[in-house]
Image (cartoon, rainbow, N blue to C red):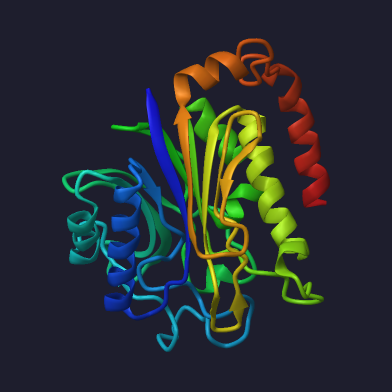
Amino acid sequence: MTVTVAAVAANFTRDLDENYALIADIVAQAREAGVQLLVFPEAAIGGYLSSLGNHGDTVRTTQRSLPPAVHLDGPELKRVQEIAGDLVVCIGFCELDDDGETRYNAAACLDGTTIYGSYRKVHQPLGENMSYAAGAEYRAFDTPVGRIGLQICYDKAFPEAARSLALDGAEIIVSLSAWPAARTATAENLQEDRWTYRHNLFDTARALDNQVFWIASNQSGTFGSLRYVANAKVVDPGGNVLATTLLDAGLAIAEIDVDESFRAMRGGMFHLRDRRPDAYAADLVTREVLVDA
């Protein structure tokens, strides 16, 4: 089955009405281009943190600059569903737990009638744990466009995260980000920045590691002290970038055929099949001891 997919690079802030207007405009562009799966960035509903690290504005008890926290079944996501219609959309937001206090950096995959799956970010960089609790699991889920796994931003630096989703049958891994440029010694040309390089390298490596399609969205522009690097992209199971926005806001659109690509790229060396878990376990235990020491 051939599916047209798109990764979004765009700027989202605390202004929810402005965000919804932008979401609606992007959905309209995607629909006109025949897109069936559209991936928005991390924190597209309400924006991301205004800084990373202990700079006084990411403390859990401070409400001054934290994103609005919403429930998975709340009106905010229902509004996105109304906009999405028959389009399958992945989108990031700040999720409020049922206890009314705990916040998670989260993402959901939905269309106009169904929330197919959701995810709470597991790996937290640079003081993000002062604002969010950490998630605890990776699970793939079925959608009309294939079996999808979600992860958020820093997760892509951990091969185990993508591998967990691939082993759970994910054909498409969606990586939603608010990935900024380096905080020190930032390159004049952001495309040459070392954090841009890492963002792009992780995307291609994780796709090739697991021989899956990888759709990476990202914020663009600036918010607070953060300057985002965009570079939304679609990567095939061979690690080839099929489409990218580079530093620009916009859509990276590609047509993919999961079955045909898997036959071609997993036909010889199939990384998931050729794993040797029996050889890894003892080594992992040893390494964990070394890291802890």
Q: How many marks?
A: 0
Q: In which quadrant of the rendered view does residue 180 lie?
A: bottom right
- Would residue 73 be found to the left or right of residue 62 on screen? left
Q: Determine if residue 170 is in view.
A: no
Residue closest to the eye, 81 or 220: 220
Which x, y percent locates residue 168?
47, 28
81 on left or right of 165: left
Residue at the (61%, 72%) spot, across then down: 127
Query: Is residue 217 depicted above or below 265 in this figure?
Result: below
Residue 4's x, y, as percent? Answer: 40, 37
Percent of width and height locating residue 234: 54, 43
Pick the front one: 288 or 258 = 258
Residue ID at (37%, 56%): 91
User: Residue 263 location in percent, x, y?
Assistant: 54, 14
Residue appearing at x 34%, y 80% in the figure = 15
Foreground residue, 48 or 200? Answer: 200
Q: Eyeballing the image, is 66 above or below 262? A: below
Task: Depth check: give the residue in front, 66 or 22.
Answer: 22
